[in-house]
Amino acid sequence: MGINVFENHGTGEYLIGSFTGLFLWDPVTGSITNALTGKPYEGDPGGRPVGDMKVTGMMTMPGGAKYLVEYNTGLLPLWHDKSTPEMPEKILNESRMSLWNLSLEFHTGRIFENLTGGFYILIVPLTGITGIIVVISGYIVWRRKYRK
């Protein structure tokens, strides 16, 4: 996914968030610190670039309170204990799933998670490969037919 959060943190450091986690990076010294634990970052160059905290975004409220958007958990308070406001009951009862959210569930393959378990992660790439094969084979058939 790449970098999802890139924000000046003050003191010359930058707050960097990705599926690997949330980090403070100092471009002068080159140091990288896990922003949630305070420990220096120790990457695994041979492993998957996915950490325990999959950061998909961040927002800062007008009062300065920051909230982290995590892939699995949702909106989390960052460095404070202010909770997010509850969704009004009327909206919960009368709202359906938006087309945007439905499209996102298909795009990520999560809509198939209950059917396939952990295999859902492969559905999107396999569908893409299948689509490419269909397009290429269709072109080959078309070319053979109309080449004459």
Image: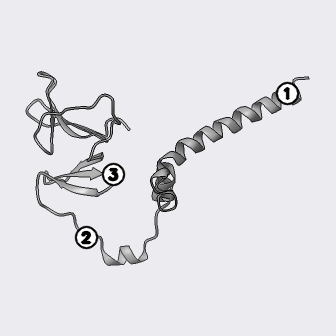
Q: Which one is in front, 126 or 118?
A: 118
What is the C-alpha distance between the residues marked 3 and 2?
19 Å
Q: Which residue is mark 3?
A: 71
Q: Which residue is mark 2?
A: 86
- Using a 10 Å C-alpha cutoff, classify the residue at mark 2 as few (fewer than 14 neighbours), some (14 to 19) or many (20 or more): few
> What residue type is disc 2 on?
Glu
Q: How many marks?
A: 3
Q: Secondary structure at mark 1?
A: helix
Please report the residue visible at 67 percent of the width from the left and 36 percent of the height from the top.
133
- CB atoms at circles 3 and 2 under 8 Å apart? no
Question: Is the residue 146 above or below the residue 16 in the image?
Answer: above
Q: Which residue is mark 1?
A: 144
Question: Which of the 4 image quadrants contains residue 130?
Answer: top right
Please report the residue visible at 13 percent of the width from the left and 27 percent of the height from the top.
31
What is the C-alpha distance between the residues marked 1 and 2?
61 Å
Whole-percent x, y for residue 29 in the image: 11, 22
Whole-percent x, y for residue 7 in the image: 21, 37
- Using a 10 Å C-alpha cutoff, classify the residue at mark 1 as few (fewer than 14 neighbours), some (14 to 19) or many (20 or more): few
Question: Which of the 4 image quadrants contains residue 140?
Answer: top right
Tell me: 36 left or right of 114: left
> What residue type is disc 1 on?
Arg
Q: Which of marks 1 and 3 precedes in the sequence?
A: 3
Q: Which of marks 2 and 3 precedes in the sequence?
A: 3
Q: Secondary structure at mark 3?
A: loop
Outermost residue to the right: 148
Whole-percent x, y for residue 104 in the image: 46, 53
